[in-house]
Image (tube, rainbow, N blue to C red):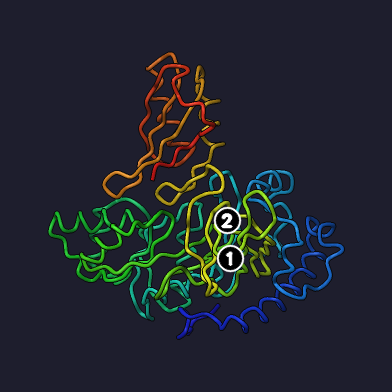
Amino acid sequence: MTAGLSDAAKGQAPDVREKDQLARLNAQIARMRETQNYWTERLADVVPLGSLADLAALPVLRKGDLVEMQAATPPFGGLNGNPVGSLRRLFISPGPIFDPEGRGPDWWGSARALQAVGVQKGDVILNTFSYHLTPAAFIFEAGAEAIGCPVIPAGPGNTQEQLLALRHYRPRVYVGVPDFLKIIIDKADETGSDRSSLEIGLVTGAALPESLRVELASKGVAVKQCYGTADLGIIAYETEGPGMVLNDDVIVEILRPGTGDPVPAGEIGEIVVTRLDPDYPLLRFATGDMTAMLPDGRIKGWLGRADQATKVKGMFVRPEQIAAIERLVPGCHRLRLEVSRVGEQDRMHLLVEHDDSNVVGPLAEKLAEITRLKGTVEVVAPGSLPKDGKVIDDQR
């Protein structure tokens, strides 16, 4: 994907797109078989595919597999298609999972999503995703550069400095999680700070309730959302009409959770993505996210998780992280993380079975350290939490 995509919000026609993707996929499989040890045996008997539907016969790679693979064969488990020294950036995401960024224009595929919300060459963009170790900020930085937009590398938090940036640089575009956009707008209105330049927003990393979209629109900011991951870049994005348009550099299947079997059209299943990229080619990568395919080839958008992992303020929180807290604080019996929304913001509340209420402080510290997010902690009596198998209870 490159700059100058006047039709970037539209993508390719379905038949042209499939023909192009099939040719690129077969070339990629041949290269993976020859250059990546992980795939040599798994793809040994694979002949050129006749259609994208033939992907269903190939193995699924799960996100949880990456942790073990990367630990055994640093840094990327042997999945990188080009030498580490040729890459542009190297990231650490919660898990930990190690993600690369290759070189080339719009490597993450965010330009189409930005243009779909109305971003034009020369628009100033306020990028509030974190620039520390994780790739989210750089995903959109690359797309902005491809279009020809200057970026304010604001990162999250520091609301007063965000308002200063709004007044001084007068950005037209916000990029970040939806909750933080509301925080900035509310603080600007509360203090009388000029935010009149801000007109459009591209959000991801957290749910965008329709009530929040309407509220932001009423305050002069039109918002669309996109869907992506640190491993795959931007997978789909909103344009006009229902659902999300699939990016041209990904092949998306909707599978029955825990299997490699496609679900019937319209049925909810797990999003499995094949990324067509020479630096980090991923074949049938299971995201753990749920959606359904619409009749026109769009997807409905994010419809929850196939496992208990969830996103809070744009960051994944996983059951294994809660288990790590339990191991690090002596005397814990069982833990349960409740995730809710209060005032259009995500909230975490950790319930812990323990005999000593004085462990609230240490538990809160470990929660923030391991998840990189703040939350409240409540100690409850041993045996009082529901025995329903839930470690994370997403109540949103």
Residue drawn 52% across and 59% down?
Answer: 291
Q: Quadrant of residue 192?
A: bottom left
Please tell me whether residue 195 is drawn above or below residue 186 in the rendered image.
below
Q: Are marks 1 and 2 in contact (CB under 8 Å)?
A: no
Please tell me whether residue 69 is drawn above or below residue 380 in the rendered image.
below
As drawn, the label of residue 269 is 2
- Type of amino acid at the residue the image marks with label 1: Ala
258 vs 367, left or right, is right
Residue drawn 32% across and 59% down?
Answer: 210
- Type of amino acid at the residue the image marks with label 2: Gly
Query: 121 or 326: nearer the eye?
Result: 326
Horizontal and vertical percent position of residue 38: 78, 55
Mark 2, other Cα within 10 Å: few <14 / some 14–19 / many ≥20? many
Q: Residue furthest top?
A: 355
The residue that label 1 is drawn on is 265
Please tell me whether residue 272 is drawn above or below residue 356 in the rendered image.
below
Query: 51 or 71: nearer the eye?
Result: 51
Residue drawn 62% across and 59% down?
Answer: 263
Quadrant location of the N terminus? bottom right
Q: Residue furthest right?
A: 45
Q: Quadrant of residue 78?
A: bottom right
